[in-house]
Amino acid sequence: MVNPPTPAANVAIVLCDGFSLLDVSLVAEVFRQVNQVSDIARSIDNCASVTMLSSRGGYVTNSLSVRIKTDAIDEHLFERFDGVFVFGGDSENAASIDPADLRALRKVLLNADLVKWSEQGWEIIAASGYKPPSAGAGGRFESCRREQGSSGNKKSTVGCGMSSSLAAALSFIPWNLSIEIAHRINRHVIVPGFDLSCVDEDALNEVSVTDRVHSAVEWLRKNCRRSISIARVAEVAGMSERTFLRHFKVVTGKTPSEYLLDVRFEMVCRLLQETTLPVDKIARRCGMGSGEHISRVFRRRLSQTPTEYRTAHRANGDRHPVS
């Protein structure tokens, strides 16, 4: 089975007046896509968290007068972020920020595993007194990351240019999923300088399709008690019904209906062996409608009734009543 990314990423985006809406949108979209995968797998624990911050909170305006609401940095002073992205600002903006707010920003940056900034965002970072270990005196590197599993505060550089914000956000995600998300974003947004030519398209498509089918398989197992349509499962996999049916059969060797019936049949067999529930009640619990439906399936598959199966598979006469 394909699991969503673990552990969840906890990311902060620090906004200053004049920020680039494209940069901010690209970073936020990466984690929205991650959460979409997590929602498909019904795994809330794996959802990424993105918090918009500014020096004082409230609305921050970009160069085109687009306003985004933010929390104040000092409200998250003791929160540890996997990554902090700083966008916008200039020397005049930095000079107008209260020194206490700059100290709060420095504390947040020191606690982060990755710090990423735009060219203008550097003004705010420099004013806060934060000095990336790799930057040296007067250096202006665009990002730095705390190396996982290393001692001390050793950092490594992560990309540069317009697309480096996107690359840095993608670095939180397993490679196969990050490539797929990068392609999704690139299909809808032209990202200057972001080169995907090194990716093997055939390999990408194979990984993407297989992962989507496996996500649908996991969703089917978790939701087998419900009434399920092919259209809904195809939506989970992010495919048209026709494409989904074709790929599902290739990956699993069965149609979605056959697979779903197998999952439900396994559940029915287990409840017959382990409980004293009536067959009709088991049918409702397993999404199979009625005891008559179960009886038809048992006769077709095992040439016996559910009651005969229950009798034959009682282990040492043990029973486990379930209401």
Image (tube, rainbow, N blue to C red):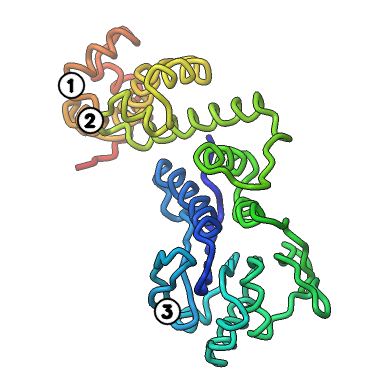
Please report the residue visible at 45 percent of the width from the left and 63 percent of the height from the top: 64
Residue type at mark 1 is Gly
Q: Secondary structure at mark 3?
A: loop
Report how far apart the C-alphas of labels 3 and 2 lie in the structure: 54 Å
Q: Position of residue 96 (x, y in %)?
A: 54, 88
Residue 286 image-quadrant placement: top left
Q: Secondary structure at mark 2?
A: helix
Residue type at mark 3 is Gly
Q: Residue furthest bottom?
A: 99
Question: Mark 1 = which residue?
Answer: 291
Relative to residue 231, is residue 217 drawn left or right?
Answer: right
Q: Earlier in the sequence, mark 3 or mark 1?
A: 3
Q: The C terminus is located in which quarter? A: top left
How many residues crowd mark 3 within 10 Å: few (<14), some (14–19), many (20+)?
some
* Residue 106 to residue 98: above or below: above
Q: Secondary structure at mark 1?
A: helix
Report how far apart the C-alphas of labels 3 and 1 lie in the structure: 60 Å
Question: Mark 2 = which residue?
Answer: 282
Q: Earlier in the sequence, mark 1 or mark 2?
A: 2
Q: Position of residue 186 (x, y in %)?
A: 56, 40
Discs 1, 2 touching: Cβ within 8 Å: yes
Relative to residue 110, is residue 99 drawn left or right?
Answer: left
* Residue 251 to residue 160: above or below: above
Question: Mark 3 = which residue?
Answer: 57
Q: Nearer the viewer, residue 322 or 287?
A: 287
Q: Earlier in the sequence, mark 3 or mark 2?
A: 3
